[in-house]
Image (spheres, coloured by chain):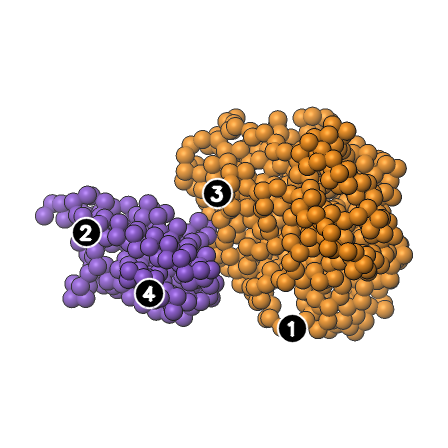
Chain colours: A orange, B purple
Amino acid sequence: MKNALMAGALALLLPVIAAAGEYSLTVDRVMIDTGDFVKEGIGYNGASPGPVLRFKEGESVTINVTNNLDEPTSIHWHGLILPFEQDGVPGISFEGIQPGETFTYEFPIVQSGTYWFHSHSGFQEPNGAYGAIVIEPEGREPFRYDRDYVVQLTDKHPHDANRVMRNLKMMPDYYNRQQQTVGDFFADISKHGFMTALQDRLAWGDMRMMKADVEDVQGFTGLINGKGPEQNWTGVFEPGERIRLRFINSSAMAYFDIRIPGLEMTVVQADGNNVQPVTVDEFRIGVAETYDVIVRPKTAEAYTIFAESMGRSGYARATLAPEEGMQGPVPELREAPLLTMADMGGMHGMADGDMATRDGAEDMDHGNMSQGSMEQASMNGSSGMAADAGTTMARMDHSGMDHGAMIMAEGGASDPFYAEGSGLVPVAANGGKFLSYSDLRAQKPLYEEREPTREIELRLTGNMERYTWSIDGVKYEDAEPLKLQYGERVRFKFVNETMMTHPMHLHGMWSILDVGAGEWNPVKHTVSVQPGTTVYMETEVDAPGQWAFHCHLSYHAASGMFRKVVVEGGPDQGNTAGVEVANDGGDA
Amino acid sequence: MNASKLFVAAAAMSMTATTFAAGSHGGGHGSSIGEPGNAGDVSRTIQVEMHDNYYEPEAIEVTRGETVRFMIENKGRLVHEFNIGTPDMHEAHRDEMKMMVEHGVIQGGKLNEDMMNMDMGNGHTMKHDDPNSVLLEPGQKKEIIWTFSSKTNMEFACNIPGHYQSGMYGDVNFDSAADTQARAD
C-alpha cells in the first residue's frame, strides 16, 4: 500500500521533473589559444566558448551559475523572452553575481531557435565569456535537415578588452591599420584629379574620421567555435545530407561576410525566428545576430566556411567535410571597402530618411560640397546635429556643383538598408545573391498587425575623436531611462548620424524590423543600422520591468550608446516602483 | 516591371514546358516519370496536405503502372506547389518559379491570376498548367491523376524559391515487391 502510494506520488512528480531542465555553469579563468596567440580570458565550465545549452520549448529551466572569478559577473540570455529579473544585466535586472557566489536563474522557455548567452559585466564577453543556446521547438519545424551544427564566431583580440578600451579612448585610431597613406592620396589624385582628391581628403579630416573607419578595432583573429583559421573547426557530413548551420556572431566588434564556396545556403531563421526560406550565396552577420541556414553538399569533398570581417581586416575559417582532416581551398581576403561620402551619417539632411521614400541619389547630388559647409556639419557636437546639417544644406548653393566629383563607391551595388552610394554595400564573391534585410519575411507572423501607438526617434550619435558613443547625443550615465507603457506598440526610428554600423539590441521584447512587408516583417532581437540610414522597427511592449537597450558593439556600449528602458504598468505589478535595483549603470 | 521583361519570362517558361513534354512523352528512356492518367483507371486516392513549408505525408509508395488520384490541399498561409518529377526536372523548374516570384505572379500568400493568364503575345502566358503539377493559394484544393508507368528516381516537390531547399519535398517510392511480381508476370 505504502509502495503503491509512493509510486503514485512519483508518477505525479515525473511529468514535472521531465519538464524542468537543470543546468550548471561555472565562470572561470581560462586560456584561449587561437593558433596565432594564447591569451588568458574568461569562459564557462573551463572553456571559451562555453557549452551549447540545449533547451526544449515549454520546459522550465534552472541554471546554477557559480562565479569562480575574483570580480562580479553575470549571464545575459541573448534573445530569450523571460521575466526581467532573469535577464542578467547588473544594475538593471539584478545586482550581479559576486565572486564565490552561486546564482540560480529560473525561467520558462517560451520560444525555440538559435540564441546565445554572454556576460553583461565589464568586458568579460569580449574576453571570452559566451556560449550558444539551441532550443528545440514543441512542434515540427517548417524545414528539414539531417544534422545541425552551431557555428559561433568571435573576433578574438590579443589585447585584453579593458586595454583595448583604454587605447581607443586615448587614440581612437589605435587599432585602425587601414588608414589611408600619402601613397593612397596620390593614387586618388591620378584616379580622380587633384582637387577632388584633396577635397575628399579634407572633408574626411573634418569628420574626425577616415574612409577606412569601417572597423575601429582591427588586429583580431576570427574564431569559429573557439578555433582559429589554422585550427580549422570541422563539421562532418555524408554527401546528400541537409545540414543546418546555426551561425551566431558573438564578436565584440566585427561583422562577418559569410560564404561557403561551392554551396548555396538557404536561410531559414534569423535571430531565432523562422523566416520564409531564401537561398543565397553569401550573407552578412551583424554583431549579436544569428542566422540559421541549410546547406546540402552532394559530393564527398571539403567545403570551406569562410567568414571575412566587413572591413576585411581579419577572417574566420572552418570546414565541412566527409571526414576530419580534409581541407578545401581558403579564399584570399577581398579588398577592404572604403566609406564614401554617402556613409557620412547626418550629412545629407536625412530628416526625410524614410527607407521607402528616401532618394539617396538626390542626397548625393550635393556632391562637391564646399569645405566651409563641411566644417559646420562636422561630427563634433553630436547633439542637434541633424538640424545643423539640414540648415547647412538649405543654405548651400546647389547650382554650381560638379556632380560626380566626389569619390563614390564604384560598382553600383545597392541595398535599401545601406545609404545610396555607400561603400559598405556587400557584394557576393561569386557575383550571386547576397542576403539583404529586405529579403527577410517572417515565416509566420508572431503578432497581429496593428498601427503603432507612437513613434520614438533615437539618433545614434558619436564623436570618433574622443571615442564617445551615445544616443541623441547623450551618453548612458547622463540619460534618463526610456519609458514605455505596457500594452503599447512603439515604432522606433533609428537615425544613424555616425559613420559606423550599429547593431541595436533591445532586451526582453522583440524588435519587428520594418522591411515594408506588413505582418510578414521579420522579428529580430538585434537590428543593424548602417551609416547614413534610417531604420524603423516596432515593438509590442509586452514585458513589464526594466530592460537594457544598446548598441552591441562592446566598446560602443561601454562608451555610452546604451539606454535603460522602463516598462510601466503591466499585469502583475502595476508599476515598477518596487524594483530595488541601483541605477549604477548596466554593464555592457 | 515592363512588358518586354514579362514576355521574356513567359517565353522562357513555355520553352521549358516544351522540353518537359518531350521528356514525358518520349517513352522508353527509362527515366520517364509517367503520364496524366484517366479517371477510370484510378486504383486509389492519396491525400496530400501542403503546410508552410512541408508536405504531409513526406513519402508515398506507388506501384509501376498504377494510376493514382492525388487530392492536394494547401493548408498553409503561403502559396505552394505540388509537382511530380525527377530531381533534375525540379531543379530546372525552380528557375521558372523564381521568375514567377520576381515578376510578382507569386506573392507570399497570393497568386496573381490575371498576370498568369495575360497574353504576352504569340500565345505565351505565365500559366502554371503542366499536368504533373498544381500551384495552390492557401485554402485551395486540386487534384492530379497520374499513371506511374515506369520505375524512376522521383520526388514530389515545391519549387517556390527556398521551399525545396529547406526541405519541402517528398519521396516517391516504388513498391519493389509488386515490381518483382510485375517482372515475373
Q: Earlier in the sequence, mark 3 or mark 1?
A: 3
Q: CA distance from mark 4 to mark 1?
A: 40 Å
* SS assignment at label 1: loop
Q: Determine the CA span between mark 3 and mark 4.
A: 35 Å
Helix, strand or loop at disc 3? loop
User: How far is mark 2 from mark 1, CA to CA?
Assistant: 55 Å
Confirm whether circles 3 and 1 share one chain: yes
Q: Chain of mark 4?
A: B
Depth check, front residue: A251 or A180:
A180
- Going 64% across and 41% down the picture, which residue do you hit? A256
Q: What chain letter is assigned to the residue under label 2?
A: B
Residue where numbered disc 4 is placed: B119
Please state the chain letter of the residue tagged with numbered disc 3 in the rendered image: A
Graded by Cα atoms within 10 Å as few (under 14), some (14 to 19) or many (20 or more), the crowding at tag 3 reads many
Q: For the residue marked with disc 1, what is the amino acid?
A: Glu
- Residue drawn at x 60%, y 60% is A515
Which residue: 46% across, 66% down? B109
Residue type indicated by callout 2? His
Which amino acid type corresponds to the residue marked 4 in the rendered image?
Asp
Q: Return the residue at label 2.
A: B25
Where residue A478 sits in the image (x, y, percent)?
90, 56
- Per the image, the residue denoted by label 1 is A451
The reply to whether residue A418 is in sight is no
Q: Are the residues at dot 2 and dot 1 in contact (C-beta closer than 8 Å)?
A: no
Residue B40 seen anywhere in this rendered image of the structure = yes
Image position, residue A413 (x, y; %)? 58, 46
Q: Nearer the viewer, residue B121 or A104?
A: B121
Identity, as a three-letter code, of the amino acid under mark 3: Glu
